[in-house]
Image (tube, rainbow, N blue to C red):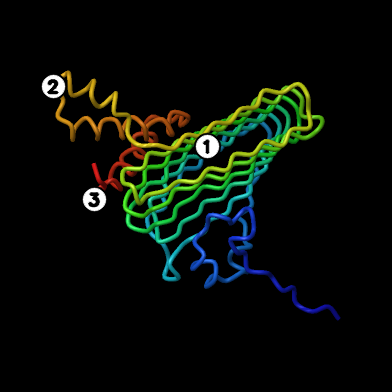
């Protein structure tokens, strides 16, 4: 007779949870953290998923984990606004068959002591699949925005075309951002790229706008809006793209602009 399986609670020593809120992990139910929603995108099918994380649960945080298998020439498009706290994590694991495509656009946005993160793993399991990821973070107060993005290209996945890009704007000195891009490539005929940048608002752009008569506070808001909008350029539905941008901008209330 076999006993029940004992699940270990993740900690910050685990690489995939290294930037997570330690207090939340200490109190969380290991069984809940181990759960995944499982989806399948049929060959040739297009599935679009859009999410807004706006509040944490009573335990002080929320974790959503989605595992998606995209069939041959299928397409999975996902975009999300992570404006929740105290701790909020959206994790995606996507496996792509031949000719499949995955796109992700995400924004973490918040202040106070919130910890918000996106964690993605894209597995190019067969040739000629493509993936694009664009993540933006806007943090103030003592908030932290994180992006852990991994791309795996298996040995036979030739003609893979994959890219991910992360940028963070820190509106106050106490805010922080962490990026951990990873590429693990075993095929030799691929195009894979990643990039990360963390900094403050572009002073040169703000000066240029001021020289054209735009008040400084308006200029800052316009710069942040354009910056956030980058993450949703991959969203093909214009109405949804506008709604996600509006949700993100609404979360800017109280920001140090």
User: Residue at (37%, 35%) from the top-left corner?
Assistant: 228
- Marks 3 and 1, the one that precedes in the sequence: 1
Per the model, the C-alpha gap separating discs 3 and 1 is 27 Å
Picture coordinates of residue 47, whole percent (x, y): 56, 38
> What residue is shown with label 1?
104
Quadrant including the N terminus = bottom right
Marks 2 and 3, the one that precedes in the sequence: 2
Identify the secondary structure beneath mark 3. loop
* Residue 69, placed above or below residue 185: below
**CA distance for labels 2 and 3:** 25 Å
Residue 150, given in percent of the width and then of the height, sits at 63, 41
Q: Position of residue 116 (x, y in %)?
A: 45, 52
Which of the 4 image quadrants contains residue 132?
top right
Which residue is denoted by mark 2 in the rendering? 213
Which one is in front, 184 or 201?
201
Residue 181 - label = none
Please tell me which residue lies in front, 45 or 192.
Answer: 192
Q: Taking 140 as reference, is 229 above or below it?
A: above
**Mark 2 residue element:** loop
Q: Are marks 3 and 1 in contact (CB under 8 Å)?
A: no
Quarter occupied by residue 61: bottom left
Q: Quadrant of residue 217?
A: top left
Residue ID at (59%, 29%): 163
């Amino acid at each position: 007779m076999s006993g029940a399986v004992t699940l270990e609670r993740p900690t910050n020593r685990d690489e995939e949870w290294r930037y997570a809120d330690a207090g939340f992990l200490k109190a969380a139910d290991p069984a809940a953290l181990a759960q995944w929603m499982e989806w399948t995108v049929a060959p040739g099918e297009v599935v679009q998923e859009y999410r807004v994380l706006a509040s944490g649960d009573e335990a002080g945080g929320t974790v959503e984990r989605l595992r998606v298998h995209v069939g041959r020439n299928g397409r999975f498009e996902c975009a999300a606004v992570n404006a929740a706290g105290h701790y909020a994590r959206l994790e995606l694991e996507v496996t792509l068959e031949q000719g499949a495509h995955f796109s992700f656009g995400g924004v973490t946005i918040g202040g106070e002591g919130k910890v918000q993160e996106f964690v993605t793993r894209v597995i190019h399991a067969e040739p000629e699949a493509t993936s694009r990821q664009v993540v933006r973070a806007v943090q103030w107060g003592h908030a932290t925005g994180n992006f852990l993005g991994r791309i795996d290209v298996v040995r036979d996945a030739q003609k893979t075309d994959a890219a991910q890009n992360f940028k963070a704007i820190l509106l106050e000195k106490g805010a922080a951002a962490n990026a951990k891009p990873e590429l693990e490539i075993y095929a030799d005929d691929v195009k894979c790229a990643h990039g990360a940048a963390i900094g403050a608002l572009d002073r040169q752009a703000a000066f240029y706008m001021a020289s054209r008569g735009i008040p400084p506070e308006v200029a800052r808001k316009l710069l942040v809006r354009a910056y956030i909008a980058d993450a949703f350029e991959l969203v093909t539905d214009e109405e949804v793209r506008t709604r996600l941008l509006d949700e993100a901008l609404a979360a800017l209330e109280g920001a140090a602009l």
